[in-house]
Image (spheres, rainbow, N blue to C red):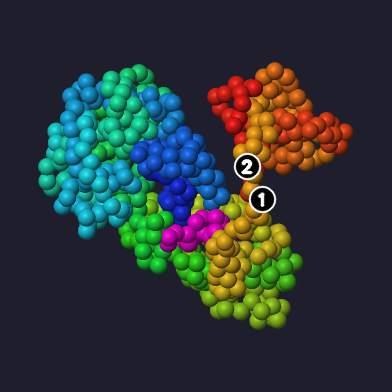
Amino acid sequence: MNKKFYLTTAIAYTSSKPHIGNVYEAILADSIVRYKKKCGFDTYFQTGTDEHGQKIQLKAEANHITPQQHVDNISNEIKRTYKLVDVHYDHFVRTTDDYHVKEVAKVFEKLYKKGDIYKGSYEGNYCVDCESFFTTKDLKDGCCPDCGAKVQIMKEEAYFFKLAPYQNRLIEYINSHPEFIQPESRKNEMLNNFLSNPLPDLCVSRTSYTWGVPVHFDSKHVIYVWIDALLNYVTGIGYHVDETCGDLYNTYWPADIHLIGKDILRFHTIYWPIMLMALDMPLPKQIFGHPWVLMNHNKMSKSKGNVIYTDDLVELFGVDAVRYYVLHEIPFASDGNLTYELVCEKNNSDLANTYGNLVNRTMAMCKKYFDGKIGIGEASEFDVDLEALLGKTVEEYHNLMNKYRIADAIESVINLLRASNKYIDDTAPWVLAKNEAKHKVLEGVLYHLLEVIRVATILLEPIMPSASKNVYSQINTKLTSFEDLEYGRQKSYIIGEASVLFKRLDVNKDVLDKVLAKENKQEEPKKELPKKEEITIEDFDKLDLGVGQIVEAKKHPKADKLLVFKVDLGNEVRQIVSGIAKYYKPEDLIGKKVVVVKNLKPIVLRGEESYGMLLCASDENNLELLNVEHLLPGAKVS
């Protein structure tokens, strides 16, 4: 039976669209899971979205939509972004999912009945963005120590979770399990800055907002967003607090690694383990607090306007180059820097010049000198060193990947590729080709290059899956598992068609000019629509507007842009033709209640009578029907 490996990311907060700093974690997680899967593990990768809290409620209200509509929009955007960068998860949990909400409420009630949660009141410095209270000594210049936002003094009735009874047990566990918090510096931070003093009880409910999981036995309270969010790691795999847990939970819990940002380490290494102890559940095997992706050495922040979005990077550099950069340039324990210029530089130096150039040169020489058919050939004086480096690289790579030192593991492979380019210069195949007696040595040189490319590509597959498939196709190999990493595993090659793996980019013409053009386009003032002649209330009263319900919808038989509707107006059903086929499918509109201009003169549009008009709103790119939720057909609109 294969060994199990369960990895979770922190679930993304659905306040707004994620930037590359947010998405980095999902890419990192994906690369680890791909690696473990290639090692033969039975893997399970869970990610998702954190969808409750005051900040989300305020965002939704500001946009005149419901909180559920807001989180639906952002959750879908996050899924789309993960798909864009080849992140393949097994389960996407949402904290608004019914099964999760149900278990969160049950866990809260269990801890209350057990005496770990009690009712009190709280006054303190509250950060809406972080959904956290802070003591005055924790504040930095009077602001939140985590995000820098202004805090507000808040006093409210609340429930509290007792942390002190479990504090010594947690300290003992951390000290006896040195791998529990990684990197080491993060563990020292928790022990020295938080656990060295008595832990205050944790406020675990709110009454100042309503968008959250209600406390069953006290409905004016909603459960603290962090208690709600942390439980996703077990509810998403079938944990049940008072009944038999599901097969996934029994198979994969405890998690092998919680992969999280260093800014939320306290919640995961103090509150979460104590909650699990209170529930008599095993603790995760490791909590890894990864560093941040900085922009020009500053933390990305939408409020500061210094964010880079994943879509923009992928549009400029491609998916694999973006994955490569964030995985190679964000170190194990310290923050990494990202700018458009830096990504371009790495794309050119490591991917186009080192990796891509090696593949291109090798493919071209194989075609030119041997018509694409390469056997083992004969040895050259430079072969032993290259073979030894290949074996050493494979060993180093596994050692580093298993320690989650992804950047260092990638660098070991890039060093092998650099050495292979030097091997070409040392062996000078173009010179060997001129000497018939060296024909077999030339073949051996090209064989060595193909084997290095094959092995290096296998090692880079968890990092750049699409590029790896491309190279496998070019060199025409099926030997792509970790069992095939030995030099000489493939005895001969009949290579496929060559293609450019990575393009060299001009930092100005191909990158910065495009970024600037896009920014300028976004900043262009919107053209003012020509103003229409003002009307009087008497003019407006001439319109007969009412609520109608679409009971039938179909495409116009003679016009692709038109849809034909039967609309119930309460006392009659009319046929109305509307030019909205570009924006709506007919079947999606049946049952919708809309606003109708009832006293518009009937006309015939391409053979179909239309009596009335459906009101819509539009801009340059979008169009939406005006919908009515609660009123019945026939209701007057005024």
Give the image location of residue 535, x and y in percent. Answer: 64, 44
Measured Cα–Cα span from mark 1 to mark 2: 13 Å
Q: Residue at x 71, y 29 (%)?
A: 598
SS assignment for the magenta stretch, majority: helix
Q: Which residues are magenta?
A: 305-329
Name the residue nearer the viewer: 632 or 20: 632
Give the image location of residue 190, x and y in percent. Answer: 21, 49
On the image, which quarter does residue 153 sit in? Answer: top left
Give the image location of residue 620, x and y in percent. Answer: 65, 51
Q: Which mark is residue 602?
A: none
Q: Residue furthest right?
A: 607
**Left or right: where 258 falls relative to 144:** right
Name the residue nearer the viewer: 496 or 488: 496
> In the rendered image, is residue 21 in sight?
yes
> In the rendered image, is residue 490 in sight?
no
What residue sits right under mark 2 in the picture? 536
Q: Secondary structure at mark 2?
A: loop
Residue 440 highlighted magenta (yes or no): no
Asked whether the residues under the numbered discs 1 and 2 touch, taking CB atoms below 8 Å apart as contact, a structural biologist would say no
**Left or right: where 464 falls relative to 407:** right
Residue 313 highlighted magenta (yes or no): yes
Q: Secondary structure at mark 1?
A: loop
538 above or below 380? Answer: above
The disc labelled 2 sits on which kind of residue? Thr
Q: Residue at x 65, y 65 (%)?
A: 500
Q: Residue at x 68, y 30 (%)?
A: 544
The disc labelled 1 sits on which kind of residue? Lys
What residue sits right under mark 1 in the picture? 532
Q: Nearer the viewer, mark 1 or mark 2?
A: 2
On the image, which quarter does residue 506 sit in? Answer: bottom right
